[in-house]
Image (tube, grey):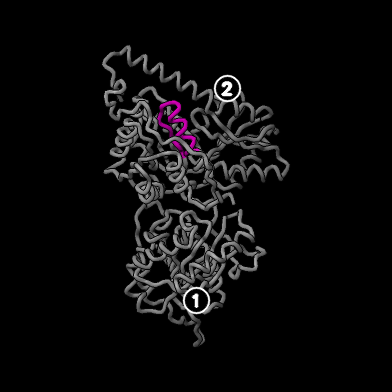
Amino acid sequence: MMNLKNIIIVTGHYGSGKTNFSANLALKLAKKSAVSVVDLDIVNPFFRTADFKDLFAGNNISLIASKYANSSLDIPALGFGISGAVKNSGDRTSVGNGTSVSSYTIIDTGGDDEGAKALGRYSDILANRQYEMLYVVNMYRYHTRKPEEALELLCAIETVSGLKCTGIVNNSHLCGETTPEIIAASLPYANEIAGKAGVPLLFTVGKRGINCESVDFPAEVLVKTTWQ
Amino acid sequence: MEKSLMKGNEACAEAAIRAGCKCYFGYPITPQNEITAYMSKCLPKIEGGVFVQAESEIGAVNMLYGCAGSGVRCMTSSSSPGISLKAEGISYLAGADLPCVIVNIQRGGPGLGTIQPSQADYWQATKAMGHGDLRIPTLAPNSVQEMVDMTTKAFKIAEKYRTPVMILADGLLGQMMEPVNFSDETLSCEPYSFGANGHGNKRPKNIINSLYLDPLKLEERINERFARYEKIRLNESAADYDKGAKIVVAAYGSTARVARSAVDKARAEGINAGLFRPQTLWPFPEKQIKDATVNAKAVLVSEMSMGQMVDDVKMALEFKLPVEFFGRQGGFVPNPDEILAKIKEMEGKYNA
């Protein structure tokens, strides 16, 4: 699917749906490729990629997270494995019999420019590699409702990470209140952001099964509360 | 205004600004940091807005005292261990009759406990929020929308009765995202008339104080304050509940969301269960729980604690109904099936 480069960095306003998108992307790519997901979120205490440990294990996706992720320890630790994973990412992975598959590394960052600061730690490694840096946007997210607000944040993320955005992911939704019209209405917003940032609008995400022509990346809702 | 997606913590901060909050004093602690971060970004942009990251929680709560004492609407927020540090200052705020809003996004304790969600500060908020004879009206939201609505309400109650008001939420409510609406209602941003902000020889001087050299004056003040508490008890208690159930599940905050799912599942299986959800913890909604339990055989209290609301439920029901408890601790949020299993067990036990 989707001619993405092998290192995929996922950024966005916190609460834009980065983690849910990253997990869905990992599950899609894992059907044909080796996939690692790096949880680089040092901002959020809960609702983070490390929540999907079991789901990933069941789908042969390796999860690289700080050993303190989802623990009670309140420190923004990055962990030892991340550097190596970033360095080795994108290489083909042997699956035996002399064959190999392409391998993807998805880096799920924390929200906003604060969360993207952690990327700066690896930017010297990443900048010399072929990477995608996707910017996830949600038109219904307070403070990024206007394209200029989303662009301002993108600029801040690029500045602190030292990396350049390569594509926009339109994840506009209102949780359980999302309708096909709500998604369709976000297209001009997402296109304007992509146009002004000079990068393509790569995907429009929607809950699997939603009847909306604009959706080209059907996704499961994986980030949820215990009562959902 | 159209709906927006917000995190509970952000929604609380934005609602406070819209309710006329001009000053915020805080100190970082997970899982409430988005309130502090939001205020640091947004408050300096409004007229008269001041954000201070204090040197400690104790510093922050005393800045709140000075700010409210000068008549300005203000707020602080923290999470459990930080609220304990603020307790002395909250007692002083109550002793000086200063309106302000204190938000507790609870995490697990005692001590540093965990950064995961908890509801183990119920006793602290409703019974022991600082030394002395005092009450703190305590509001318990269970959705991001209620984080908005109750923050607005907290500022109104604080001003109306000249008292600190607490919003007792939990880490899950603070961190989760839901669609919210802000009302177009405009609240007064005018300084409180009692503020010690300079009389300019145009009015009698205003004094902000909690120390009384004359015991009679202190007693008189406490009695007057308790007359206000009685009005709060009569007018401000609130709850959301089902009527006519045989097994009533009492839960607030995030746990009430889980309990709602459990009750709906029980009903789908033909069990006559209902939810009672206090929206104010002090005053505890006594009349409302009586109304909710008219047909009840038993009550199940569910909390993310060892059962701190249980006694209030028993007292409100005058010990006339059996009250059982199911809870999780240590940062765990109960899941609907766990509560459902307890409902089923009680259905059999009490022949409901």
List the residue tagged with mark 2: B318
Q: Nearer the viewer, residue A161 or B186?
A: B186
Q: Is A19 on the left-hand or right-hand side of A72?
A: right
> Local crowd at mark 2 within 10 Å, few (<14), some, or many (≥20)?
few
List the residue tagged with mark 1: A34
Q: How many marks?
A: 2
> In the picture shown, does residue A72 fall above or below A162?
above
> Local crowd at mark 1 within 10 Å, few (<14), some, or many (≥20)?
many
Residue lying farthest to the top in this orientation: B216
Q: Residue at 44% x, 60% y: name it.
A: A149
Q: Amino acid at mark 1?
A: Ala
Q: Chain of mark 1?
A: A
Q: Secondary structure at mark 1?
A: strand
> In the picture shown, does residue A35 fall above or below B146?
below
Q: Amino acid at mark 2?
A: Glu
Q: Chain of mark 2?
A: B
Residue A220 is situated, as x and y percent measured from the top left of the image, at: 59, 63
Main secondary structure of the magenta stretch: helix
Task: Answer whether residue B154 is magenta in the image.
Answer: yes
Labelled disc at residue B102:
none
Q: Which residues are magenta?
A: B150-168
Residue B29 makes an appearance in the image: no
Q: Do the residues at discs 1 and 2 belong to one chain?
A: no
Residue B203 location, quadrant: top left
Q: Residue at 31% x, 44% y: name it.
A: B52
Residue lying farthest to the front in this orientation: B202
Marks 1/2: CA–CA distance: 63 Å
